[in-house]
Amino acid sequence: MIPKKETQQYILPRRMRGLQPTLIRQFFERALPDSINFGLGEPDLPTPQFLRDEAARIARDEQNGYTSHPGIPALRTKIAEQYPHLNLPMTGVVVTCGSQEAMTDAFMCCIDEGDEVLLPNPSFPAYDACTRIAQGKPVYYRMPAETEFSFDIEEFRSKITPKTKAAVVISPSNPTGKIMTAADYRQIAEALDGTGIWLLSDEIYSDLYFGERPHSASEFYERTIILSGLSKSLSMTGWRLGWAACSDPEMINAIQVLHGFTTVCTSTITQKASLLAWTDEAEAAKQNARDVYKARGEFLVGLFKSEMGLKATSPEGAFYTMLDVRELGDDLDVAEKCLQNRVVTVPGVAFGSEAKGFLRISFCNTEQKMVEGVERMKEVLTR
Ligand SMILES: Cc1ncc(COP(=O)(O)O)c(C=O)c1O
């Protein structure tokens, strides 16, 4: 007989302790009515009509049961073809509920208790959370603010230890909008060669670039797990279409098994409609998104300079810039003042110590709204 316990108090499992909603969410949840949103990284462009129509047709006319756990073969084939250098069979791809699920699955399949994971500082807070859920230890490498958050191989190399199990790269970056160069990836591949360390490459913004198309880390280093999806480039955040792709059959098999037990499969309607995500129409929509975000980024950086005399990093991709507010005080206080004047921003510290003194500004807004947002920031910050 198991003895009865005095109290039935819920005890959070160790792997969950210390996890909290991100500062990005915390600021967004506290937004006043009629706020301008420079906070969330959510595309404001409409989901292309042909995708909506196709999803509506599929929901109306077809029976949509479960698909096989890793997704419908035609979709996995299309995704595999996106990485011709890997010569990947469709079995090298698992379709997931957004790239967030691919990320969590990949961490869980790489990391054991006590393993070290190299994470960029600054970077998307989910990497830290995923490392902790997998009971690993985050170890940060700086992307130095003084070089506009560019990659520094010496810094990266200095953090590798015998306990390092995985490293994360993201390009184009959330929060900085910076892109890793081929030379950066070559240096990483050289540093990781023969170590067995997994490279988790977050490529969710890979279709949103303003110059040359970014490279995939997998072009340079074999033990790469690509994490990507359609959320950002086709304004499909709520459709939940992501994937993990990897040329190691055992790794992708592990991800597939975990995925089967966490979500079974991504929405069948979403998967079938997403077959149109590589058509000429879709490519035109992605090109339009690139053009729109590029113009907006330039406009907003110019506006901060002309209206407030502040410097913001020049975005190379994604839809973010880092606004340097060090002369105005602590980034948390500055973001709080903005919030009280109905402008949502994210304090840099949400992404790591290296971004302290900066605000992450997302330009998922019309020019008119951006003008209004900067005006409101000016009212409270430059008096
Ligand atoms: C860097 C980064 N990775 C992954 C995700 C997850 O996106 P999704 O799950 O919609 O593909 C996001 C979303 O904001 C992101 O910014």
Image: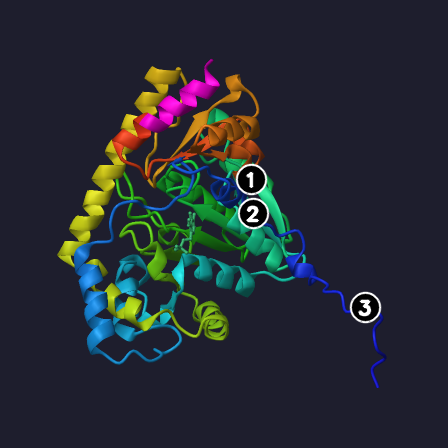
Left or right, residue 116 beside residue 303: right
The colour mode here is rainbow
Decide: marks 1, 2 in contact (CB < 8 A)? yes
- Residue designated by label 3: 7
Residue 375 position (above or below residue 287) = above
Query: Where in the figure is residue 196, as x and y percent of width and height?
Result: 54, 58
Specify few, some or many for label 2: CA neighbours under 10 Å numbering under 14, 14-19, or 20 or more: many
Q: Amino acid at mark 3?
A: Thr
Q: Amino acid at mark 1?
A: Tyr
Q: Is residue 374 magenta?
A: yes
- Residue designated by label 1: 141
Q: From where the camera sits, is residue 211 visible?
A: no
Tell me the distance, in whole angstroms, between the alpha carbons under discs 1 and 2: 7 Å
Dot in front, 3 or 2 = 3
Q: From where the camera sits, is residue 219 visible?
A: yes
Dot in front, 3 or 1 = 3
- Residue 102: assigned label: none
Residue 270 position (above or below residue 22) = below
Query: Where in the figure is residue 146, as x and y percent of width and height?
Result: 49, 24
Tell me the distance, in whole angstroms, between the alpha carbons under discs 3 and 1: 44 Å
Sooner in the amino-acid sequence: mark 3 or mark 2? 3
Query: Where in the figure is residue 8, as x and y percent of width and height?
Result: 77, 69
Residue most extreme to the top = 383
Residue 97 position (above or below residue 130) = below
Specify few, some or many for label 1: CA neighbours under 10 Å numbering under 14, 14-19, or 20 or more: many
- Residue 118: assigned label: 2
The magenta segment: 372-383
Q: Quadrant of residue 77?
A: bottom left
Q: Main secondary structure of the magenta part?
A: helix
- Of residue 143 and residue 230, the one placed in the foreground of this image is 230
Q: Amino acid at mark 2?
A: Leu
